[in-house]
Amino acid sequence: MNKKIAVIRGDGIGPEIVNAALGVLSTVADKFGHTFNYDDVDMGGCAIDKWGDPLPVEMLKKCIESDSVLLGAVGGKKWDVVPGHMRPEKGLLRLRAGMGVYSNNRPAKIWPQLADASPLKSEIVDKGIDFIIVRELIGGIYFGEHKTTEVNGENKATDDMSYTESEIERIGRIGFETARKRGGKLCSVEKSNVLDCSRLWKKVMHRLAKEYPDVTLTDMLVDNCAMQIVKDPSQFDVIVTENMFGDILSDEASMITGSIGMIPSSSLGNGTCGLYEPIHGSAPDIAGMDIANPIGTILSASMMLKYSFDMENESDCIEKAVYNVLEKGYRTSDIMPQDELSSSCEKVGCRKMAELIIDEIKAM
């Protein structure tokens, strides 16, 4: 099978972790008889430096015309001084909107080898952490009007948050369908005691629930959900929520699994062309030091194979390889036990971790 993958290496550690994932993908292609063609795309700070635009039109076109997109990370302090509409993150928002990927799925799953890396008490971790956050991705406050005006001699900033019924319904259906394929439990998270957007969200979700009698729907306020994720994450199966709440909750969820560097994500719309990326940032402070954890990006590539290319066996091969490498005690610095001297684990860098995973794939 031939597939064209748009590759956005981005900024900071982005090039390192993407190169690691491409090595894994190429190994899978060789093993299973596929051809993956990689098309480089400039986005983020590197695109600002090169083109004066965080996402030039021709770069967005490459992504839309690809079979899927693999993204590292964008941004960094270097570009904090540029105008708001030119920041690297604006390129990411435009990419999501241009591709029409309205559903971001972020799994929060603890690997058994990393149970000790979770900041939660062992009795909480032992109950299990395995849920998915379905986040609406191209609506809400991130895509509303943003303006700063002068009122009575002082600056006033306004950010508009809005949702239509149809926007809520399409992400709600993703939540219900995802829960139907898992444990049959869906938690809808909002702030309906304060926000009109959330009251509409809740109304639409309960209307949809009538079409999914096999899924148990519960409601939870976002502040309570943030507390419950650290108090008892085992209660969750699928969480569905709006853009900003999902952004915050999914980062919180990633940390209880041991490291943000382990968590992949997929963003999909109505077609199979998706955007796949780890959920962490560009980490410019460690860029070029070969200490970044590439596993989140490698697992994002694995999700691409499964959800966009219908290559479930190939995806499972990558996940098994990651499991085996962790089982043998190899760790990047972010998942290394705190007491390194007494640990039987071996610390490795970004490139070495990718090589170990590649070796496992070849040996299967």
Image (cartoon, rainbow, N blue to C red):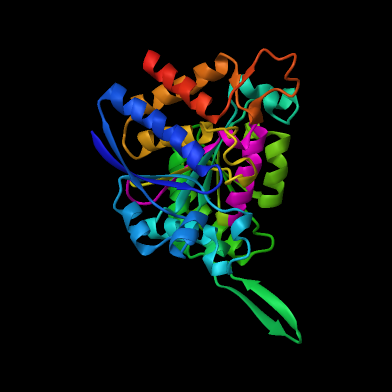
Residue 75 in the image: state x and y as whole percent. 56, 53
Is 39 left or right of 233, judged from the image as shown?
left
Of residues 307 and 83, the one nearer the viewer is 83
Query: Residue 261 in magenta?
Result: yes
Residue 52, image x, y percentages? 46, 65
Looking at the image, residue 282 lies above or below residue 243: above
Q: Position of residue 23 (x, y in %)?
A: 40, 30
Q: Is residue 362 left or right of residue 139?
A: left
Question: Which quadrant of the structure image shows residue 196?
Answer: bottom right
Q: How many marks?
A: 0
Image quadrant occupied by the N terminus: top left
Residue 282, above or below 362: below
Question: Does residue 214 appear anywhere in the picture?
Answer: no
Q: Which residues are magenta?
A: 244-272
Query: Toward the viewer: 285 or 175?
Result: 285
Rendered residue at 73%/31% (across/down): 119
* Quadrant for the C terminus in the image: top left
